[in-house]
Image (tube, rainbow, N blue to C red):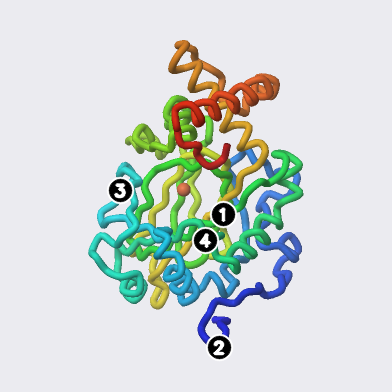
């Protein structure tokens, strides 16, 4: 691992080294080629982030120590299942320190996530480079990239990250170990109802987002190892699992990172969700989801934006990230 004399994390990233023609000079690139990449489609991607020293376990342990005081280390209790609530806390459920958690991270069932790693300067630089690899493709479709973040998941099989949705677009990259990832289309209302999606985007609750038997067959399934990943758009339901049987000697820890970002398009969609929620809850309408009609979205965007800010000012409703 590259560290300074006092053990601090490196402040600069190593130069990009071409490994394949498609990935030359880039951290992330589309498996299906550039013309096929769509920000609205769940699809496989390739990456080289597993080669970066900041992604090794000792560096992540240092990062966890830096993030722990700000409650950005998140812990999931043992026995999580796909249909569990995705409720994580800021303390280990067994009462261990973050150092103890990492010292025993290879114990089967371990699970810790590092949230908002962009708050650390070296990781912010790296995340910007990762998204920068895809910036021309993304911005041609979604307008400017507004905000980049990173979420690192460290676990020892068997582990499950329960079914949930997020606000951001996501380059989800496997760094070490193996995982199976299920991802559903963002507009699949048989999996997550439009109202549940709106409520999550506007209020942040996941109470109505739960896995049910029969959902799995509607999902895209990716069996990913180091160098492989999945792109999925904002509000695509997803969950992951790993199994003891996949563990090779000396490789008992799985690490993944979600490199996430907002764009002008995700911001427009969030405000359309807010207007749709008003129409649904107060006027009994069944509004069209964002992304299906550009002209309707253009009409609803300023209305939703004005409504959500008025409600924030007048009634103190928390303004969620992404607006
Ligand atoms: Fe997620």
Near mark 1 (Cα within 10 A), the count class, few <14, some 14-19 or many ≥20, is many
Left or right: 38 with respect to 164?
right
From the image, tell me which residue sits under label 4: 117
The reply to whether discs 4 and 1 touch (Cβ–Cβ < 8 Å) is yes
Q: Quadrant of the N terminus?
A: bottom right
Whole-number angstrom distance, CA of label 1 to CA of label 3: 26 Å
Determine whether label 1 and label 2 are within 8 Å by CB.
no
Tell me whether the residue at label 1 lies in contact with that at label 3, contact meaning CB atoms closer than 8 angstroms.
no
Query: Residue 79: image x %, image y %?
Result: 25, 54
Distance in Å between CA atoms under marks 3 and 2: 43 Å
How far separated are the C-alphas under marks 2 and 4?
A: 23 Å
Q: Residue furthest left?
A: 94
Residue 261: image x %, image y %? 60, 48
Residue occupied by mark 2: 5
Separation of residues labelled 4 and 3 (CA atoms): 26 Å
Disc 2 crowd rating (10 Å Cα; few below 14, some 14-19, many 20+) is few
Q: Earlier in the sequence, mark 4 or mark 1?
A: 4
Whether label 3 touches label 2, CB < 8 Å: no
Q: Is residue 249 left or right of residue 267?
A: left
- The front one of 36 and 14 is 14
Numbered label attached to residue 108: none
Q: Which residue corresponds to the image point at 51% horizontal and 30% vertical from the top-left?
A: 313
Q: Which residue is mark 3?
A: 81
- Mark 1–mark 2 distance (CA, rounded to whole Å): 28 Å
Label located before the other in sequence (2 or 4):
2
Label 1: which secondary element: strand
183 w.r.t. 271: above or below: below
Residue 322 in the image: x percent, y percent?
56, 40
**The CB of the residue at mark 4 lies under 8 Å from ligand 1:** no
């Amino acid at each position: 691992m590259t560290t300074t004399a006092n053990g601090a994390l490196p402040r600069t990233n190593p130069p990009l080294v071409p490994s394949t023609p498609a990935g030359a000079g880039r951290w992330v690139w589309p498996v299906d080629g550039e013309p096929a990449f769509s920000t609205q489609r769940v699809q496989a991607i390739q990456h080289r982030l597993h080669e970066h020293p900041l992604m090794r376990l000792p560096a992540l342990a240092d990062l966890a120590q830096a993030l722990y005081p700000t409650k950005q280390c998140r812990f999931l209790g043992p026995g999580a299942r796909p249909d569990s609530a995705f409720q994580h806390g800021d303390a280990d459920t067994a009462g261990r320190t973050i150092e103890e958690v990492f010292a025993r991270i290879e114990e089967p069932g371990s699970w810790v996530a590092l949230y908002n790693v962009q708050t650390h300067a070296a990781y912010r630089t790296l995340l910007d480079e990762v998204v920068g690899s895809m910036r021309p493709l993304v911005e041609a479709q979604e307008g400017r990239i507004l905000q980049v973040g990173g979420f690192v998941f460290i676990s020892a099989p068997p582990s499950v990250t329960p079914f949930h949705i997020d606000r951001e677009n996501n380059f989800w990259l496997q760094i070490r170990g193996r995982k199976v990832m299920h991802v559903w289309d963002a507009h699949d209302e048989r999996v997550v109802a439009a109202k549940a999606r709106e409520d999550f985007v506007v209020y942040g609750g996941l109470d109505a987002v739960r896995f049910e038997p029969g959902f799995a067959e509607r999902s895209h399934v990716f069996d990913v190892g180091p160098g492989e990943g999945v792109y999925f758009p904002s509000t695509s339901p997803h969950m992951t699992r790993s199994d003891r049987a996949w563990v090779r000697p000396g490789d008992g820890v799985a690490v993944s990172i979600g490199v996430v970002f907002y764009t002008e398009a995700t911001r427009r969609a969030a405000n359309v969700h807010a207007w749709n929620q008003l129409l649904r809850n107060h006027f009994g309408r069944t509004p069209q989801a964002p992304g299906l009609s550009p002209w309707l979205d253009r009409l609803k965007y300023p209305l939703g934006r004005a409504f959500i800010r008025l409600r924030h000012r007048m009634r103190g409703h928390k303004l969620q990230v992404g607006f």
